[in-house]
Image: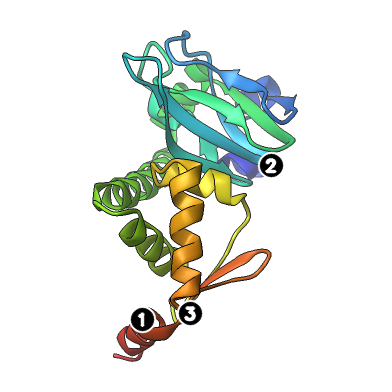
Amino acid sequence: MFLFRTRDLPEQLTAEARSHDLDRGDTLYRQGEPVEAVFAVEYGRLQLCTSTSEGRQVPLYTVRTGECVAEAALFAQNYCSDVVAEIRSRVRSFPINTLRDTLRKRPDLAAEFMALQATRCNTLRISLELRSLRSARSRILRFIEISAPQGSDTVTLDRSLKNVADDLGLTHEVFYRTLKGLIAEGLVKRTKNTLELTGAYGRRLAAGNAG
């Protein structure tokens, strides 16, 4: 990601960048706060979520090492979500006005930034697809299917199952109960850090990859 390629960035932008350490549960910024910077994750994992009118937190997506945070706020006045550290993390901040000027003057970097936005839109599309499925069973099976690398029926988890349940819009009780049922049916195999499609679903995925 271009914000980490210091040698490619204007001197003013790198000079104004600052690193910030976050402990688990720390808030980077809150929905509605004035936009001051765009952030790049040096290491760690952050969760973006938004609040409904009833005060309920809705997870949007997860940002990992090497990715950008708050890029959607580049031309906004206020942040549109809350960002909380899921684990100990470090982010680097880039002042919003300086970053805007950089992208206006550097079409090559602006093109990379647009590619980041396109990737983020796809992430949100997948999240909406999963949440649109009516049953918890369908959400879990589809999550494993689309999260597994191409040619594989196994997804390696870098987050807790509690976080996965939140992403799927399921209560923890419903998620664990449904997952337990899928394992009992022989459709899913679970290890400490993986979920694998087996049985009919695993065979279907393998046939699709072969075709």
Residue occupied by mark 1? 205
Q: Which residue is located at x 43 percent, y 76 percent? A: 185
Q: How is the image coloured?
A: rainbow
> Which quadrant of the figure has residue 124?
top left
Q: Secondary structure at mark 3?
A: loop
Q: Which residue is located at x 55 percent, y 18 percent? A: 29
Q: Is residue 157 visible?
A: yes
Q: Earlier in the sequence, mark 2 or mark 3?
A: 2
Q: Secondary structure at mark 1?
A: helix
> Which quadrant of the figure has residue 60?
top left
- In the rendering, at what x and y percent does residue 23 appear? 75, 28
Residue occupied by mark 3? 152
Q: Does residue 197 appear left or right of residue 133 in this picture?
A: right
Residue type at mark 1: give it: Leu
Vertical placement of residue 25 versus 143, above or below: above
Residue occupied by mark 2? 44
> Which quadrant of the figure has residue 141?
bottom left
In three-dimensional space, the C-alpha distance between marks 2 and 3, rounded to whole angstroms, equals 26 Å
